[in-house]
Amino acid sequence: MADEQSTATSSNALRINFILNENKAKQKKEIEDRRKHKPPKSLDEDEAQFLDGWESYKKEKERRLADEEALELRRFRAAVASQCVASKETLISHDVDDHQQRVIIGKKNPASRPLSLIMKVMPLAKKPKKEVQSVQQNRLQIR
């Protein structure tokens, strides 16, 4: 009798548990259906102001970064231009000095000579070694 009661109560508990789970699933489905068909909630004034302020903050930050990059680029270009001018001045002064030295010394620039004057050096043919020939002759005599 105790066994029958325990099996009956356990089967009742299983049925009740199954029914409760079905009810929970139905409620979840109804809630999800309501959310899907519900129109989106409009923003409050505070939320709208916050979002507007955030957008303006981002735009201002991007503008500042662009201004800083432009300023840095202008400074870099000015520095490069000043270096180019300085290097051109030094090159011009070196060219004038080199020209004056050439005039005084009277030597021509070796690079300005015509290519026909450049001589080609051909390697000499190798001579056979006498030792190798004598070893080969000895081998022939032994055989």
Image (cartoon, rainbow, N blue to C red):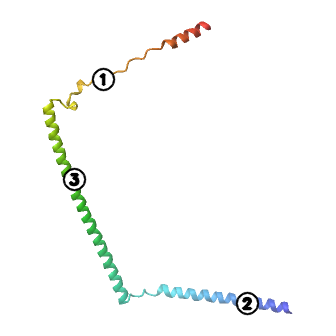
Mark 1, mark 2: which one is toward the viewer? 1
Residue 104 position in % (x across, y down):
13, 32
Left/right placement of residue 24 relative to residue 75 reads right
What is the crowding at mark 3: few (fewer than 14 residues within 10 Å), some, or many (at least 20)?
few
The foreground one among 62 and 5 is 62
Residue type pointed to by label 2: Ala
What is the crowding at mark 1: few (fewer than 14 residues within 10 Å), some, or many (at least 20)?
few
* Disc on res. 120: 1
Q: Are marks 1 and 2 in contact (CB under 8 Å)?
A: no
Residue type pointed to by label 1: Lys
Quadrant assignment, res 54: bottom left
Residue 55 position in % (x across, y down):
33, 78
* Residue found at the far top of this picture: 141
Numbered disc 2: secondary structure: helix
Query: Looking at the picture, does residue 61 appear above or below residue 137?
Result: below
Which image quarter holds the N terminus?
bottom right
Residue type pointed to by label 3: Gln
Left/right placement of residue 27 relative to residue 108 reads right
Residue 66 position in % (x across, y down):
28, 68
What residue is at 53 percent from the left and 85 percent from the top? 32
Q: Label 3: which residue?
A: 83
Residue 113 position in % (x across, y down):
20, 28
Numbered disc 3: secondary structure: helix
First in sequence, mark 3 or 2: give its number: 2
Query: Looking at the picture, does residue 110 appear above or below residue 40?
Result: above
What residue is at 21 percent from the left and 58 percent from the top? 78
Left/right placement of residue 67 relative to residue 128 reads left
The foreground one among 76 and 58 is 76
Q: Label 2: which residue?
A: 13
The foreground one among 26 and 134 is 134
Q: CA distance from mark 1 to mark 2?
A: 109 Å
